[in-house]
Image: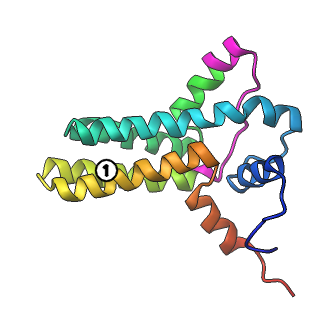
């Protein structure tokens, strides 16, 4: 499989990126309905990190790390559950399917949020701003392009070498 997909349609590119994250088996109709809502959890987490860092509040980041721990253990983030039980019912959109691959992303973000909270607590604001900024950038990339760096790395590692 080539590393670049220049000839893909926007829909095919979106599907490939979503499937790389582990969301497989969605119909085209489900994918179209879910597309805007797949931004919800990453954007909410980006906002959580930005508020925690900018407000210089380790407790907000520690709470975010606990939310990520929940997602890592149960492979469903509490913000996903909020979407599934509240927003999808109000909007009439499909629920997000179960996605075990996201556990790795949640685990990595839990470690990063916990470290950022620790840096703030210790007064190491430069480190907190750098790591917090990196998290906001990664989450924004996921929200706006559906590129999940952790999932892309796992996909490349799992991909069998071409004969």
Residue 64: x and y, percent? 37, 39
Residue 94 appears at what percent x and percent y?
77, 26
On screen, 39 above or below 155?
above
Residue appearing at x 69%, y 66% in the figure? 155
- Residue furthest to the top: 90
Q: Quadrant of residue 158?
A: bottom right
Quadrant assignment for the C terminus: bottom right
Which residue is under mark 1? 114
Measured from the top left, where is residue 113 in percent x and y?
35, 49
Q: Is residue 5 left or right of residue 99?
A: right
Q: Nearer the viewer, residue 31 or 69?
A: 31
Residue 89 belongs to magenta span? yes
Q: Residue at x 41, y 52 (%)?
A: 135
Does 51 appear above or below 162? above
Q: Which residues are magenta?
A: 86-102
Seen at 47% across and 33% down, the residue is 44
Under circle 1, the secondary element is helix
Let me know if residue 91 is in the magenta part. yes
Q: Is residue 29 visible?
A: yes
Q: Quadrant of residue 87?
A: top right
């Amino acid at each position: 499989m080539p590393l670049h997909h220049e000839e893909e349609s926007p829909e095919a590119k979106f599907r490939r990126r979503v499937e790389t994250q582990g969301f497989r088996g969605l119909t085209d109709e489900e994918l179209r309905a879910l597309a805007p809502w797949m931004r919800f959890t990453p954007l909410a987490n980006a906002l959580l990190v930005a508020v925690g860092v900018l407000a210089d509040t380790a407790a907000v980041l520690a709470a975010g790390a606990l939310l990520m721990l929940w997602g890592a253990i149960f492979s469903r983030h509490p913000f996903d559950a909020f979407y599934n039980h509240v927003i999808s019912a109000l909007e009439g959109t499909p629920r997000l399917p179960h996605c075990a691959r996201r556990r790795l992303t949640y685990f990595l973000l839990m470690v990063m949020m916990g470290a950022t909270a620790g840096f703030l607590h210790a007064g190491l604001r430069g480190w907190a701003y750098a790591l917090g900024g990196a998290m906001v950038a990664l989450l924004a990339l996921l929200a706006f392009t559906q590129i999940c760096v952790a999932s892309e790395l796992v996909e490349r590692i799992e991909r069998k070498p071409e004969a």
